[in-house]
Image (cartoon, rainbow, N blue to C red):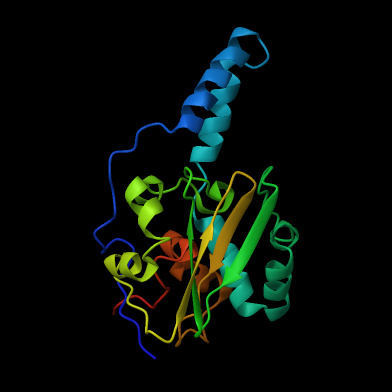
Amino acid sequence: MSEHTHSHDDHAPITDSHEGSYYEKKLLAIQALLIEKGIVTGEAIRQTVEAMDARTPAQGARVVARAWVDAAFKQRLLTDAKAAIAELGIDIGTVATLIAVENTEAMHNVVVCTLCSCYPRMLLGLPPDWYKSLHYRSRVVKDPRGVLKEFGLELPLDVGVQVYDSTADIRYLVIPARPSGTDQLSEEALAQLVTRDSMIGVTTVHLPDM
């Protein structure tokens, strides 16, 4: 079974202009009110935002690499993602529920947030612009294979595609399939192969071209 893939930098991203959503505008209004009433300072908010902005997909890649080399950890991750990730000393914040889903030879998973841009920032860093775009959010639930093809991923027809819709309380992490030819790689080297887009599910992981 073969797949046609590109690196996450090669595809023509799905984008459109991103204007503040209803929830983003509401958040800004609440933020201004809290500052006005002295409940929180603008500096405290700035520091919190900077800490969030500093997060990268490296945390998620660590989780995936551990799941690839440790079957028991992967099972715990699939059963209770928050508890398993805590074993690695990773703080995922106040998200109520985090669910890990595994890509296999028979099933490919992809994540979206159809309402806004809910996303596991604590593991993947800032969401890409295309993830927040209305174009992606509206199309991937209706034509996931077509959208994946635009990212350079054309799945065989016998591979199912499952779309997971994030919410304010639920985030998803895709565990991409481990590429063949990586048996001799260390956990750290494996983590270097894992991309943000593969943990959203719009690409797969593969060895770099030599």
Question: What x and y, as percent, mark residue 194?
Answer: 47, 67
Identify which residue is drawn at 51% across, 68% down: 191
Mark count:
0
Q: Is residue 191 left or right of residue 17?
A: right
Task: Locate residue 22 relative to residue 63 in the image: left or right.
Answer: left
Residue at image point 47% right, 79% down: 160
Identify which residue, 51 or 172, lies in the foreground.
Answer: 172
Q: Is residue 6 left or right of residue 159?
A: left
**In front: 173, or 143?**
143
Indicate left or right for 62 with 82 as reference: left
Across and down, in percent, residue 174 comes to 54, 66
179 shown above or below 16: below
Q: Quadrant of residue 45?
A: top right
Which quadrant does the N terminus fall into? bottom left
Residue furthest front in the image: 142
The residue depicted at 34 percent of the width and 38 percent of the height is 18
Q: Quadrant of the C terminus?
A: bottom left
x and y percent of residue 161 in the render?
A: 46, 74
Residue 71 placement (x, y as % from top left): 68, 80
- Name above or below for residue 123 compared with residue 48: below
Q: Residue at x 60, y 43 (%)?
A: 168
Relative height, residue 192 to residue 129 (above, below):
below
Query: Residue lying furthest bottom in this view?
Result: 1
